[in-house]
Amino acid sequence: MTTAVMTIKGQVVIPAKIRKHLNLKKGVKLYVEERGSEVVIRPVTKDYFDKVAGILSTRGRLSEALLNEHRKEKVKEAMK
């Protein structure tokens, strides 16, 4: 079991072993969900969007818009 400590600002460092295993890099967006008494954190990836596609009646338009926004943000980060 791996543990982490939350700072007074609510920040949590994901242990290096987990970051490497999931290929999480600086700037990756994470989806944070409260599930009962648990906190679930998942990277926002194309696989994530494919998994949640169809939950809303947007027929994929919302997923595509979010992916486009994510791509734009990656380009902005690369330009810095």
Image (cartoon, rainbow, N blue to C red):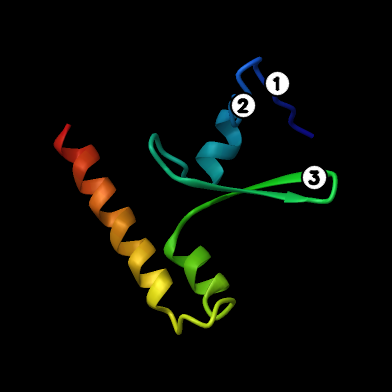
Q: Residue 12 location, x and y as percent?
A: 62, 26
Residue linked to disc 1: 5
Which amino acid type is marked by label 2?
Val
N-term mark: 2 or 3: 2
Cβ–Cβ under 8 Å for marks 2 and 1:
yes
Compute the Cα span from label 3 to label 1: 15 Å
Quarter of the view holding residue 76: top left
Label 2 residue SS: loop
Above or below, 75 relative to 68? above
Q: How many marks?
A: 3
N-term mark: 3 or 1: 1
For image coordinates 61% across by 29% down, the residue present is 15
Q: Residues within 10 Å of mark 2 (few under 14, many from 20)?
A: few
Which amino acid type is marked by label 3?
Glu
Q: Nearer the viewer, residue 46 or 9?
A: 9
Q: Residue 25 location, x and y as percent?
A: 41, 38
Furthest-right residue in view?
37
N-term mark: 2 or 1: 1
